Image (tube, rainbow, N blue to C red):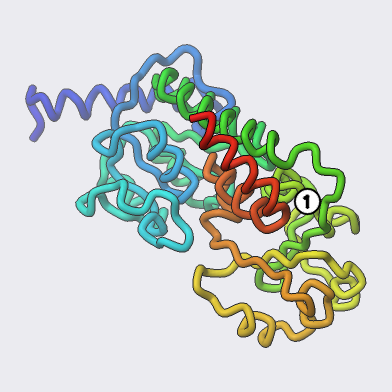
Amino acid sequence: MCSGTPRCDARAVRSAAALLFAVASTTGVWSCGLPPAEVESRAPRICSVSLAGDELLALILPPDRVVCVSSLVDRAEMSNAVGHYPPDIPRLHARVEEVLSADPDLVLAAPWNDRGFLDLLTRSRIDTVVLDEVVDFAGIREQIVTLGRRLHEEARASEVVGRLDRRLAELDGAVGSVSERPRVLSFSHSVVAGAATTVDALIRRAGGRNAAAELGVSGHKKITVEQLIALDPDLLLLGYDPGEDVEAVLDAYPHLKATRAAREKRVVVLPPRLLTTVTPHLVDGAIALARELHPARMTARREEGGRDS
């Protein structure tokens, strides 16, 4: 029985706030881009149910503000938040009963979370923010600003955006004006990344051209062997775990060997944490690819920066 204890009072406040949120919205789930202006809850206890949320919260909040994270957060090949969250913070598989047991004030979800799971969160009257789907650095930047505002951490979000802008400016200074832009094909488990993807944004920012986008591919799609060979990219960008043997990958997909990039050993492997992230860490992937596409320019820029410092 709950009677007047601080913990019970806190639960009552959270329940009342959640009810107000549910009444204020027809769905009970808000997009990150549309925070409820009427509600000024600080929402100090956050539960993330996606790797994107884990990484964003790691950039904006101290770990003690987070009560649960996704089960992917400790996977070094995928996560940019490894080691940030103490082991006593629960790692969840996006199940409502697990989220409820963590007793959060707010759940940070992603657009690719299961719709049934999100609907259950709605019926549970838990305040939920669904991240916007981003496809470029401008979207990532806006995501940070909006989330910082929603969590009342505007100053910290501004710092994160500032660092992202500086690193992008440095990259643009090195390769932004290159006239020769190699054609890059991103290939991962038979899927290529076309236009309107963060991989496309990464390739273009690194001083390359997205071969799949030039073929007319939009989003992440499978293409035929004939299309892949016809593209004949200057460089193959593979999204596999670090340490994966390139030859083993080419053996698994022998049609890749017919490309000029494979014959000339112009193959780059980036771990998913650099290639498929939708957070500011995507700039690390762009820098890594730029070093492969334009090594002389990147080296000169790095030396110039060292002299300036």
Question: In which quadrant will I find the N terminus?
Answer: top left
In the displayed structure, 133 sits above or below 234; it is above
- Quarter occupied by residue 121: top left
Residue 54 on image: x %, y %: 41, 45
- Quarter occupied by residue 27: top right
What residue is shown at x 77% (from left), y 62% (from top)?
185
State the residue position of label 1: 208
Nearest the eye: 9 or 80: 80
- Element marked by disc 1: loop
Residue 19 on image: x %, y %: 38, 25
In the displayed structure, 12 sits above or below 223; it is above
What residue is shown at x 44% (from left), y 19% (from top)?
154
Task: Farthest residue to the front: give it.
Answer: 307
In the displayed structure, 158 sits above or below 254; it is above
Nearest the eye: 175 or 138: 175
The kind of residue tagged 1 is Gly
Task: Farthest residue to the top: give it.
Answer: 38
- Disc 1 crowd rating (10 Å Cα; few below 14, some 14-19, many 20+) is many
Q: Is residue 23 visible?
A: no
